[in-house]
Structures are given as structure tokens and as C-alpha cells.
């Protein structure tokens, strides 16, 4: 935990304090930001307040009195609920505007960790509780130079593996076999292992109607064969196999042994242009040093798809934050599933991946971007046309 940085951020946001609270590991963000052990045995409520100026304070149960000893600050203890409420009231007495892992109306559910009862209690103390969403982004999503470098390591590896995967599909079909979606998942996984990458479930290789399921997962028993004339989508993600590395996550589409149909070309062009609209909007905002929130980038992309008449078929957000977790704690490009008012911060990474999912096929075009103080740019190869397999 960087106490000086947290207190500086609180002063910049004109907040009196940041209150962390947990019970049975309800708030993993607190453990990550404070540097607490994630496997600690926590059976009682604890509270830790960091003021904008001055010494932090702790409130812990007597039978877990050492739970926060690794953190700086004075300590109070309680046993009864009456002691807890009195101790909490005294600990927070100097502060009025307090940040917590809370989101009004649960709008940004990714940071909405505090239960309603705790918020009610603090409001009864006369406190104004505000969302810590932008603070969480600052301390969880902003990447170091080493982390950014690790993203580019994964990018270089996957930008070689993916096109080779498309070529492997073509080689197998021309050799007279019919590789299944799952066969190609295994091929991609083996290639990623050779490149010292790790991944979560996936990757996703989907054909025709299956490409319209944005979270499709082929299995050995359900996978479809890939044949001449098919439409193919590959979504692949990975990071280098060491702690603290950053993910690279991309999606490309193509057709097997033929030219795209007019409909396929129309949908791909619309998705590509929607992707590029978000990229341009974000890049221009950073170049002109104009703050931009996640919802604004989503609007830029979604408006292209809406104008083309495909709005009902774009069923997810435009992009997600990327960090040490594939779906990180920073701003998502979203004004559909949530109204994400979090700012896209310098030195963060995120995907841009609009999609159109028709009953017969689906197109998603995904790239990643990284920002600096005055720029925002894609980090890898950019698909401009449908792949001819």
C-alpha cells in the first residue's frame, strides 16, 4: 500500500477519507489495494480508514485483533455490536465525505462491494458515502512500465499464433480432414504453451451460428466441424507465465475457401468502423487532454452500429479494462450493460470489441489499447478485412 499516494488522491478528489470494510472476504479490492493476504482467515468485521491527511485508524474484533497489524495506524477493538457501532462512529467522527466500494443504484457493480446495511449505518452517523470507483481504477488499473512491457510480450506471441491458427485450419481442410472447433482450440492452446503463455478457459473457435454466441465454448463432444465455405471466429487471450503480467485479448473473423458474402462484408465493415470510431474518440480525447469516461467511448462505437440498423444485434459493452485480471478493475467501455462513468486513465489497458450477432453468423473485431498521459493507441495487429482461410 502506498499511503502517500492514496492520501494525495483523496485530496485531489476532495474526499475526507477512504473507508475499507470487509467480512469473510466480501471485498477482494480491499485486499489488493491494501496489500493484505488474500488467504487470511477472516470471520469478523474489520474497518480501516485512510484520511486525506493524518494517521489511518483500524477497528477490529478482539478475537481477530491482529488482522490489520501489517497496516500503519492506531487500532481500536470491539466485541459487541454496541462497541462496534460506538467505535466506528468515533473513528469516523472527523470525516464527512467518505469513499467506499459502493456504487449508487449498483450502476458500477464491479466496485459495489459494501452491503446496504453498512451504508445505512454510516448515513445514520451523518456521513456522505461516495463511490471509490475512480480511486480503485487509479490504484488497481494503472500499469507500471514492467507490466506494460509484459502486455507487449503477450501481444507479440499471440499476433503470431492467431494467423498461424487460421492457416492451420486451411492446411487441414486442404489435406482432406475436417478439423472441429475443439481441435483448433487444442492447437491454439498448444501453441500458447510453447510461447510460455497462460490463459483462462478458451480460446474460443466458433463456426457459423456458433460465432453469434459471444461466450461460446466448444467441447470435444459438442464442437462442430470446420468445412469449406464456413464462417469462422477466433477469440484468443493470454498473458506471460509469471506473476503480475498483463493480458492480451483479441478476436478476428474469416471465411474458409471463398470470398465473403455481401451480408458478411456489410456486417464486418460495420463492426470494423464501430471499433475504429471508439479508437479514434479515445485517441483524440487523450491527444487533446480531454477527460473521457467509459460510456462515451461505448457511445461512439454503438452509434455506428445503430446507424447501420444493427443495434438489436450488438448485445454487450464495447470493451473491458485489462490488467493482471482479464477483466480488470478500471473503466469499461460501456453504456449498455452499465453507465460506466469511470474515467479512462493514463497508463491503463483495455479492449475495444464491438460485435454484431445475427442468427446465421456473428462478427466481433477486438483489439487492445494502452494509454499514456497524452496518447492512446492500439497495441497489436489490426484486422482490416475478413481473413481468407
Image (cartoon, rainbow, N blue to C red):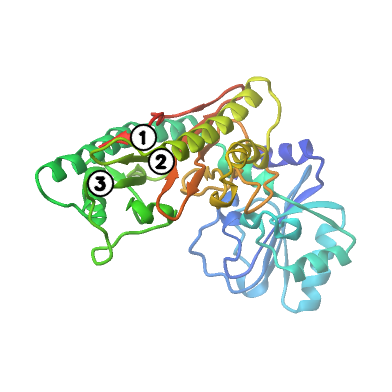
Residue 249 in sight in this render: no
- Relative placement, left or right, of 225 versus 71 is left
Q: Which mark is residue 386?
A: 1
Mark 3 neighbour density, 10 Å: few (under 14) some (14–19) many (20 or more): many
Residue 84, compared with residue 249, is above or below; it is: below
Camera-side residue: 202 or 301? 301
Q: Locate residue 272 relative to residue 72 in the image: left or right.
A: left
Which of the two residues, 138 or 205, is positioned nearer the viewer here? 205
Q: Position of residue 89 (x, y in %)?
A: 84, 64
In the picture as drawn, the residue positioned furthest to the left comes out as 175
Which is more N-terminal, label 2 or label 1? 2
Q: Residue at x 50, y 60 (%)?
A: 38
- Image coordinates of residue 217 in percent, x first then y, are 35, 59
Please provide percent x and percent y for residue 378.
48, 29
| Cα distance between the residues tagged 1 and 3 | 20 Å
SS at badge 2: helix
Q: Which mark is residue 188?
A: 3
Tell me what residue is drawn at x 78 percent, y 39 percent: 13
Q: Which residue is mark 2?
A: 264
Name the residue at 61% across, 41% down: 302
The reply to whether the C-beta atoms of the residues labelled 1 and 2 are less than 8 Å apart is yes
Q: Quadrant of the N terminus?
A: top right
Q: Earlier in the sequence, mark 1 or mark 3?
A: 3
Residue 197: name its quadrant: top left
Q: Nearer the viewer, residue 174 or 297?
A: 174
Q: Residue 50, how many percent across, how many down?
A: 73, 50
Q: How far apart are labels 2 and 3 at the CA level?
A: 25 Å
Where residue 69 sits, quadrant-wise, is: bottom right
Amino acid at each position: 500500500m502506498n499511503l502517500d499516494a492514496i492520501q494525495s488522491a483523496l485530496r485531489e478528489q476532495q474526499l475526507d477519507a477512504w473507508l475499507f470494510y470487509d467480512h469473510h472476504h466480501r471485498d477482494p479490492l480491499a485486499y489488493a489495494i491494501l496489500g493484505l493476504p488474500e488467504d487470511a482467515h477472516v470471520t469478523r468485521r474489520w474497518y480501516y480508514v485512510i484520511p486525506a491527511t493524518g494517521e489511518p485508524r483500524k477497528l477490529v474484533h478482539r478475537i481477530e485483533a491482529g488482522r490489520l497489524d501489517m497496516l500503519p495506524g492506531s487500532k481500536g477493538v470491539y466485541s459487541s455490536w454496541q462497541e462496534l457501532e460506538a467505535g466506528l462512529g468515533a473513528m469516523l467522527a472527523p470525516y464527512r465525505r467518505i469513499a467506499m466500494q459502493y456504487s449508487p443504484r449498483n450502476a458500477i457493480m464491479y466496485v459495489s462491494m459494501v452491503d446496504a446495511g453498512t451504508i445505512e449505518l454510516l448515513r445514520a452517523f451523518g456521513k456522505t458515502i461516495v463511490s471509490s470507483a475512480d480511486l480503485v481504477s487509479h490504484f488497481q488499473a494503472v500499469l507500471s512500465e514492467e507490466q506494460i512491457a509484459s502486455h507487449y510480450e503477450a501481444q507479440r506471441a499471440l499476433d503470431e499464433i492467431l494467423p498461424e491458427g487460421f492457416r492451420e485450419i486451411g492446411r487441414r481442410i486442404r489435406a482432406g480432414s475436417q478439423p472441429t472447433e475443439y481441435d483448433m482450440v487444442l492447437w491454439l492452446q498448444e501453441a500458447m504453451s510453447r510461447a510460455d503463455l497462460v490463459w483462462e478457459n478458451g480460446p474460443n473457435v466458433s463456426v457459423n451460428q456458433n460465432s453469434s454466441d459471444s461466450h461460446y465454448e466448444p467441447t470435444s463432444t459438442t464442437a462442430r466441424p470446420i468445412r469449406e465455405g464456413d464462417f469462422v471466429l477466433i477469440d484468443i487471450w493470454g498473458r506471460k507465465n509469471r506473476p503480475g503480467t498483463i493480458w492480451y485479448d483479441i478476436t478476428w473473423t474469416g471465411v474458409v475457401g471463398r470470398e465473403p458474402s455481401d451480408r458478411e462484408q456489410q456486417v464486418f465493415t460495420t463492426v470494423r468502423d464501430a471499433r475504429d470510431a471508439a479508437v479514434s474518440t479515445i485517441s483524440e480525447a487523450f491527444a487533446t487532454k480531454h477527460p473521457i469516461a467509459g460510456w462515451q467511448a461505448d457511445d461512439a462505437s454503438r452509434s455506428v452500429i445503430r446507424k447501420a440498423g444493427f443495434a438489436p444485434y450488438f448485445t454487450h459493452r464495447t470493451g473491458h479494462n485489462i490488467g493482471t485480471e482479464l477483466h480488470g478493475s478500471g473503466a469499461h467501455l460501456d453504456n449498455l450493460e452499465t453507465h460506466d462513468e469511470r474515467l479512462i486513465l493514463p497508463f491503463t489497458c483495455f479492449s475495444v470489441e464491438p460485435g454484431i450477432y445475427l442468427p446465421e453468423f456473428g462478427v466481433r473485431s477486438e483489439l487492445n489499447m494502452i494509454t499514456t498521459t497524452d496518447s492512446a493507441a492500439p497495441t497489436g495487429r489490426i484486422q482490416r478485412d475478413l481473413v481468407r482461410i
